[in-house]
């Protein structure tokens, strides 16, 4: 079975009818990376040290990049407020653009939405139904 991109999992869950169905779909595709992305999107204390909106990046034309975010998720803390202050604003933004350019295009769009706290396919209630206590309410 091919790896589903994190964006595909969240998007597919969002297409289901009830919160219970959405939560079950998330549980069926559970991974450390999925939970981490959901935390970054919805956890109240998470602040990104990047400007709002999409930076100027060129989506990858490479095929089969659906699994890339699973590998790159470990680098995401460097973009959060208070981490790696030695990077500097421009360097941090350039690294983020470089990351976006390696990801499955929908995952790049998802990561921008996560950063801007604009995920719409699932909400805190669905996430906590799937993974109790993941996001404080």
Image: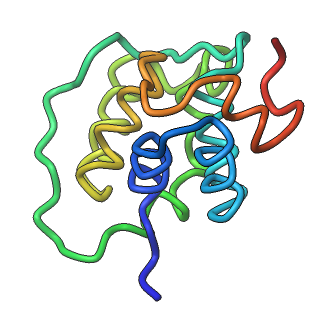
Q: Residue furthest bottom?
A: 1
Q: Is residue 131 above or below residue 71?
A: above
Q: Residue at x 63, y 21 (%)?
A: 42
Q: Looking at the figure, which quarter contains the C terminus?
A: top right
- Left or right of 103: which side holds 49? right
Q: 71 or 67: nearer the eye?
A: 67
Residue 90, image x, y percentages: 33, 21
Q: How is the image coloured?
A: rainbow
The image shows residue 32 at horizontal and vertical percentages of 72, 56
Residue 53: name its quadrant.
top left
Which residue sits at x=37%, y=36%?
96
Residue at 42% from the left image edge and 83% from the top image edge:
2
| Residue farthest to the front, as pictured | 17
From the viewer's perspective, is residue 57 above or below residue 119? below
Query: For this view, does 58 lie left or right of residue 33?
Result: left
Nearest the viewer among 28 and 50 is: 28
């Amino acid at each position: 079975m091919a790896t589903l991109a994190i964006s595909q999992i969240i998007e597919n869950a969002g297409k289901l009818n009830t919160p219970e169905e959405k939560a079950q779909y998330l549980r069926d595709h559970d991974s450390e990376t999925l939970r981490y992305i959901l935390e970054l999107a919805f956890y109240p204390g998470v602040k990104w040290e990047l400007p709002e909106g999409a930076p100027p990046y060129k989506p990858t034309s490479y095929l089969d990049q659906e699994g890339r975010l699973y590998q790159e998720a470990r680098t995401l803390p460097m973009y959060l407020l208070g981490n790696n202050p030695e990077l500097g604003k421009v360097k941090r933004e350039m690294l983020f653009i470089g990351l976006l350019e390696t990801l499955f295009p929908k995952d790049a769009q998802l990561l921008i939405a996560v950063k801007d706290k604009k995920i719409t396919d699932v909400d805190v209630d669905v996430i906590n139904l799937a993974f109790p206590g993941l996001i404080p309410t």
